[in-house]
Amino acid sequence: MLERREGMTDQKQWYAGVDWASQSHHVFLTDGDGRKIGERVFRHGGVGLAEVAAWLTANSGALEAGQIQVAIEVPHGPVVETLIERGFTVHAINPKQMDRFRDRFTLAGAKDDSRDAEVMASAMRTDPRCFRPLAAAVPVVIELPEWSRLAEGLGAERNRLTNRMREQLWRYFPALLKRHPIRRFDAAHVLAVLRKPPVEVAAGTTEAASAHVDMLIARIRLVNRQLKQA
């Protein structure tokens, strides 16, 4: 009989709703009968997310994190990843479906972090079929968007650097850039134009611009290598 009671205890479930935000997260926890155990706000960040996991485990009394069913609207991101990595059973809900469940508690329609966390915990307990179970993503799936963002950022950085180099060339040889779209001509033609006497500028302008261009070229080469890698 004792072994049976322990087995039944192991199957107990708890339900938590996490209202996610950029700066903090509101967490609401209930037992298997829907009774409130507690709620708390956690700051976003590594420490705060670790505290979420520790608080859920300590306050539920669950023997395993998987006994705690966690509901959240956002199906990805550090909150979801942290909870899944620590063994919690995490589920996502569609925002439109969330609106319907919210009507059970209030008809005002105004968003309230505490209420939304409670709504998700309650709905997770009574209507689990409306939630989508989440699993840890394959590493390459996590890496791919990051590399895509890196490539996009590097492309923008290269454009900024080349624009700065064009501005420096304009300081002492504007005729070349203003009258001739360089991309239309081959290297020999461009060199011939560059070797023509430049416009008269103040002493030191050419040297300063040349030094600036040298540094920009080095940075552009680095960005080109990184962009190729991305």
Image (cartoon, rainbow, N blue to C red):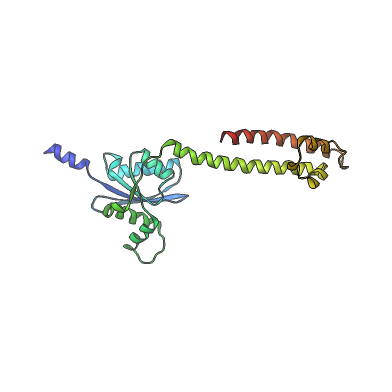
Give the side of residue 224 with respect to residue 77, left or right: right
Tag count: 0
Looking at this view, is 227 or 21 the one in front? 227
Looking at this view, is 193 or 224 the one in front? 193
Which image quadrant is residue 159 in?
Answer: top right
Residue 60 to residue 101: above or below: above
Percent from the top left, x then y, of residue 189?
Answer: 80, 37
Looking at this view, is 97 or 196 the one in front? 196
Percent from the top left, x then y, of residue 208?
Answer: 80, 37
* Residue plotted at (40% across, 40% down): 137
Location of the C terminus by quadrant is: top right
Percent from the top left, x then y, of residue 156?
Answer: 62, 44
Give the side of residue 159 with respect to residue 130, left or right: right
Residue lying furthest left: 1
Location of the N terminus by quadrant is: top left
* Residue plotted at (41% across, 37% down): 138
Residue 113 to residue 175: above or below: below
Percent from the top left, x then y, of residue 101?
Answer: 33, 59
Residue lying furthest bottom: 108
